[in-house]
Image: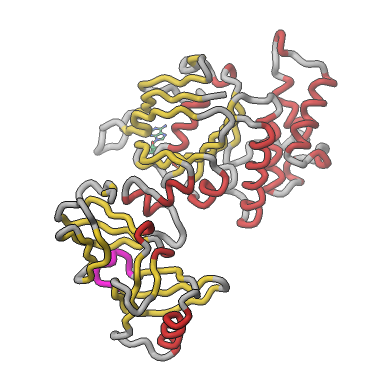
Amino acid sequence: MEVTLQNLTKKFPGRDKKKHEDVIAVNDFTFEIPDGKLIGLLGPSGCGKSTTLNLISGLLKPTEGRIFFGEEDVTDLPPENRGIGLVFQNYALYPHLTVKQNILFPLENLKGKDKLSKAQMLEKAYEAARLVQIDDLMDRKPGELSGGQQQRVAIARALVKRPKVLLLDEPLSNLDARLRLQTREEIRRIQRETKITTIFVTHDQEEAMSISDMIVVMKEGVVQQIDKPQKVYDDPKNLFVAKFLGTPPVNVFTGQIKDQKLYIGNDCVMEAKGVKDQAVYVGIRPEGFCPRADGTLCCILQGVEVMGRDISVISANEASLNTTVRSIVGTENKADMEKILSMSEGRITNDAVVKFALAPHKVFIFQKETEERIYL
Ligand code: ATP
């Protein structure tokens, strides 16, 4: 089922004592979510992710804009008539009911022509339970399950009516790191098997990157970028998006365009053909640095962390907005790497200079005022 959001806006009345302005939780959001895809809604706390999800579910009414499921305008339909499955962070299972009864619950409420026989209901409940691999736990109560198992029950309950759209609001937040990883892979598998259009809310960029077909990055109610995960990482539209995605995060410097060249401090690091002279921000992904004797960006070496396959070089640069410049370098260039390693073994002094060549496709330039990307 294709979901279309058309100029969707949600304002909440300002109730703060000093500030009476409305809170614009979602601001003019337009997007056509393709059928059968998994969309990650990503952004920091308070950026409007849950509000967007609640508008799609019908739990909230938009102030402006329309929502379509396929051709049907569902804006004025109550949640129960939209054919959605909802899963929240706190599994919200009925504690006094067994797993089986919890999953059966949405089916028992079906009325009229949709009403099912007991046998049909059981068949559907077991089918959903098998999908999330909890069919051997059907007679337990939620209190007798692990967090991950409880979340699977919640997902089975959301799937049992075969919803047209599955809405997941931070479904992994209550799970420990290992279970998070496992459950997110499960969600991906289930989504691929069922091909239900799914919208997944998270503030965790790695989670969104790993399972989404497309990512929507939001900030203060406004959509910043919608693209495939790798594209958002490789080609961020503004500084906010560049900073929000990636661990370790992008390194940000103040820079200057002068005579069609990019300077960081006094170092001329790259050509910037066609860009007029101006002050800029420069974002460099950690993997964009290559230590080389003839490198153009000079930094002061502060330390080296060897982490199995990767080597992380920590350095300082006066133009850096981060306290340290963190780069992840490969070991291909043996001579230069060995020099850095031997430097870091001795006492690192203020003049331990490390020079980096920069990979141009890992360097992003942003306008200083708007923080929008300047494309080269
Ligand atoms: P989180 O990750 O913390 O859940 P979020 O991105 O889901 O955040 P929302 O819950 O959608 O953010 O909130 C967006 C903005 O709208 C916030 O500023 C929030 O304070 C405000 N807001 C949300 N619900 C209401 C409400 N019922 N009344 C007033 N303001 C609200």
Horizontal arrangement in the rendering, residue 297 relative to residue 359 (left or right):
left
At a point 33% along the width and 87% down the height, the residue shown is: 349
Figure check: 239 above or below 295: above
Q: Quadrant of ligand 1?
A: top left
Q: Given the current orientation, which residue lies at the most extreme top position?
A: 112
Horizontal arrangement in the rendering, residue 311 relative to residue 100 (left or right):
left
At a point 31% along the width and 81% down the height, the residue shown is: 353
The quadrant holding residue 343 is bottom left
Could you say which is closer to the camera, residue 354 or residue 3? 354
Where residue 227 appears, as percent x and y from the top left, is: 44, 40
Q: Main secondary structure of the magenta part?
A: loop
At a point 41% along the width and 79% down the height, the residue shown is: 303
Q: Is residue 319 magenta?
A: yes
Where residue 348 appears, as percent x and y from the top left, is: 37, 87
Could you say which is closer to the camera, residue 145 or residue 18? 145
Where residue 162 appears, as percent x and y from the top left, is: 68, 25
Magenta range is: 317-323
At a point 35% along the width and 66% down the height, the residue shown is: 358
Q: How many numbered marks, from 0 up?
A: 0
Colouring convention used in this rendered image of the protein: secondary structure
Where residue 188 appears, as percent x and y from the top left, is: 63, 42
Could you say which is closer to the camera, residue 346 or residue 154? 346
Horizontal arrangement in the rendering, residue 360 relative to residue 281 (left or right):
right
Q: Is residue 198 magenta?
A: no
Figure check: 42 above or below 67: below
Could you say which is closer to the camera, residue 237 or residue 181? 237
The quadrant holding residue 249 is bottom left
The quadrant holding residue 96 is top right
**Quadrant that contains the N terminus:** top right
